[in-house]
Image: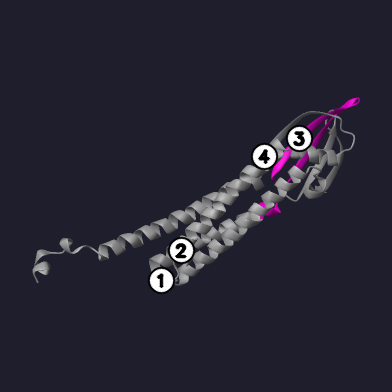
Amino acid sequence: MPSRKKTCMFASAFCSCVSSFVVVCVVLATPQWVSSEVRYSRTGSNVTISLKYGLFSGTCEQFVDAGLQVSQTTFQVADSLSSTRSRGLNVATIVVLVLALLSSLLSSGFTCTNAVSNPYQTFLGPLGVYTWNSVCGVLILLAMILFPVNVEGNRMSEELAHGCSTSLETHIGSKHTYGYSYWIMLLIVFLNVASLIIIYFYDHARYSKKKEQERPIENAPKDVILF
């Protein structure tokens, strides 16, 4: 059975890993990744398309001239994207987040195992927790890079706006605001870092205790050496 100190520290890391898993699920499920206002001009009027969407679905509102709302619709992101590049990058972001979800699940399993037992295999110990938490953090950061690249670089909002209205002509400008579904990914990174710090302190304390128990004989008292 593990010591009380080990159980407490791995249990704390387990809570961080489970919280990370839950937040990744929230990120995937909610459509509040970005809000965009895309302005177009057409004969006799200006049109503003207001979009709120995530990786899977979103809503679209169309305003004409002085804020007169014409229509509001919902759409599926994959169906509304016409560009292969935008669609591919959106799929890549989803895949990266699914891999991060699996990494969080594995990290939760490893920390739970160490909280209730002393695994013999090295990889099932702190090394495994280090690995899967690091992988999860890197994947989340990658997703945070891929999505803005798709929005800003591939003009994802403009593509989706054309799916909301077929009478758009000249693009005037776009404004993007990233929502809570995007920014809470920073919380996932923080939770993974917290888990790594907890396990590091446990591992460092265990190493220090082991070194103390293996002191060289020259540090022993002289009477013991003479004996």
Q: Name the residue under label 3.
A: 37
Which residue: 57% across, 56% down?
20
- Prevalent SS, magenta region: strand
Question: What amino acid type should be assigned to the residue bearing mark 4?
Answer: Val
Q: Disc 3 on helix, strand or loop? A: strand
Q: Where is residue 27 in the image (x, y as percent from the top left)?
A: 66, 52
Q: Which of marks 2 and 3 is nearer the N terminus?
A: 2
Q: Verify whether residue 45 appears in magenta.
A: yes
Q: Do the residues labelled 4 and 1 touch (CB within 8 Å)?
A: no
Measure how far apart labels 4 and 1 are at the Cα level.
46 Å
Q: Position of residue 126 (x, y in %)?
A: 44, 62
Residue drawn where x is 46% and y is 68% of the image: 114
What amino acid is found at the position of numbered circle 2 in the picture? Phe
Residue for badge 4: 149
State which tag comes first along the sequence, 4 or 3: 3
Estimate how packed mark 4 is, as few (under 14), some (14 to 19) or many (20 or more) residues with alpha carbons within 10 Å. Answer: some
Q: Separation of disc 2 and disc 4 at Cα?
A: 37 Å
Relative to residue 33, is residue 205 drawn left or right? left
Instruction: Read off the magenta span.
Output: 26-54
